Amino acid sequence: MYGFGAKLPPYKNIVSQNFSMNGNYFSPNISRGAEALANVYKNCIKNLELHGPTVYSEIVQLGRKWADSREITNDKYIFIDMI
């Protein structure tokens, strides 16, 4: 799960338009289920400073890269809009 539009610790002086909410940019995966997603979001939001304006194109491009690299399977994916 990736977040976007925030200043990240430790200095909170640079706005990131895409960051892993679990702290691992190259492996952003978390447990399945809405409760797991909500817990990761709650823990992450405590440590950052939301900041705009948000540049959506960077997070959309990252999502496209992830989708292009995945095989189509019968797995279920959960998409949650936290706005």
Image: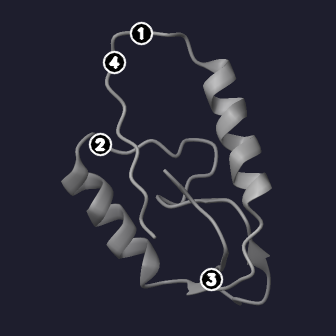
Q: Could you tell me the amino acid type at mark 1?
A: Thr
Label 2 – label 3 distance at C-alpha: 24 Å
56 w.r.t. 16: above or below = above
Q: Nearer the viewer, residue 4 or 53?
A: 53
6 w.r.t. 12: above or below = above
Label 3 – label 1 distance at C-alpha: 36 Å
Point out which mark residue 50 bears. none
Q: Which residue is mark 3?
A: 9
50 w.r.t. 70: above or below = below
Camera-side mark, 1 or 2: 1
**Element type where label 3 sits in the image:** loop
Which of marks 3 and 2 precedes in the sequence? 3
Point out which mark residue 75 bears. 4
Q: Could you tell me the amino acid type at mark 2?
A: Ser
Q: Dividing the picture into quarters, in which one does residue 81 lie?
A: bottom left
Q: Dividing the picture into quarters, in which one does residue 82 lie?
A: bottom left
* Horizontal and vertical percent position of residue 12: 69, 88
Which of marks 2 and 1 precedes in the sequence? 2
**Element type where label 1 sits in the image:** loop
Camera-side mark, 3 or 1: 1
Question: Residue at horizontal 27%, vertical 39%?
Answer: 32
